[in-house]
Image: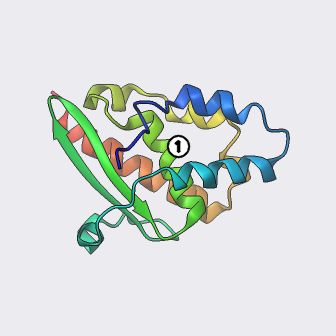
């Protein structure tokens, strides 16, 4: 199964879709449904080296760098976190390292009013995922 996030599902699509929901209960359902669209990663990739530190749930991230483009296999053991990963992938997947570095993720989260609706530990985990991806992009940037 191909990962649609960053190709057919973009950060702008998510901003637009979330604007249709009035309640955060409906938005959470939508975020969980996004996570169901993430392809599951092979169990062989669920290793300690790929774990994102700082997340309450287990989050695995495997970067690929090909043709000056970053892509990621990601997974989590929590449904809502898979949804958050999908949202992050909509912004970062299939982008150049410089595009990842330049993308204003805080503005994206602000437009969807996300962070204040997460528990502090979930918010810290989200920031840890973003920081890990940005550090990978920094290493690959020319």
Taking depth in this image into account, of 1 and 113 the one nearest to the observer is 1
- The residue sitting at the front extreme is 1
| Helix, strand or loop at mark 1 | helix
Which residue carries the number 1 mark? 87
Percent across and percent down for residue 45 are 25, 67
Instruction: State the residue at coordinates (49%, 30%).
Output: 10
Q: Which quadrant holds the C terminus?
A: top left
Instruction: State the residue at coordinates (71%, 52%).
Output: 28
Taking depth in this image into account, of 55 and 77 the one nearest to the observer is 77
Answer left or right for 42 relative to 22: left
Percent across and percent down for residue 120 are 65, 61
Instruction: State the residue at coordinates (42%, 39%).
Output: 4
Q: Say which quarter of the image contains residue 70.
A: top left
Answer left or right for 82 relative to 28: left
Instruction: State the residue at coordinates (60%, 60%).
Output: 80
Answer left or right for 21 relative to 16: right
Percent across and percent down for residue 73 are 32, 53
- The color scheme shown is rainbow
Asked if 65 appears above or below 36 in the picture, the reply is above
Label count reads: 1
Percent across and percent down for residue 5 are 44, 39
Asked if 16 appears above or below 66 in the picture, the reply is above
Answer left or right for 21 relative to 121: right
- The residue sitting at the right extreme is 22
Asked if 108 appears above or below 53 in the picture, the reply is above
Q: Residues within 10 Å of mark 1 (few under 14, many from 20)?
A: many
């Amino acid at each position: 199964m191909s990962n649609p996030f960053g190709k057919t599902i973009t950060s702008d699509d998510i901003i637009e879709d979330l604007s249709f929901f009035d309640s955060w209960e409906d938005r959470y359902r939508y975020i969980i449904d996004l996570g169901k669209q993430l392809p599951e990663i092979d169990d062989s990739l669920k290793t300690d080296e790929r774990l994102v530190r700082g997340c309450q749930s287990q989050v695995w991230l495997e970067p690929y760098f090909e043709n000056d483009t970053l892509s990621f296999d990601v997974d989590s053991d929590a449904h809502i976190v898979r949804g958050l990963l999908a949202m992050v992938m909509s912004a970062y997947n299939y982008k150049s390292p410089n595009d990842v570095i330049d993308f204003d993720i805080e503005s994206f989260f602000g437009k969807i009013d996300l962070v204040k609706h997460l528990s502090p530990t979930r918010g810290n985990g989200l920031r840890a995922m973003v920081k890990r991806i940005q550090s990978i992009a920094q290493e690959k940037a020319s």
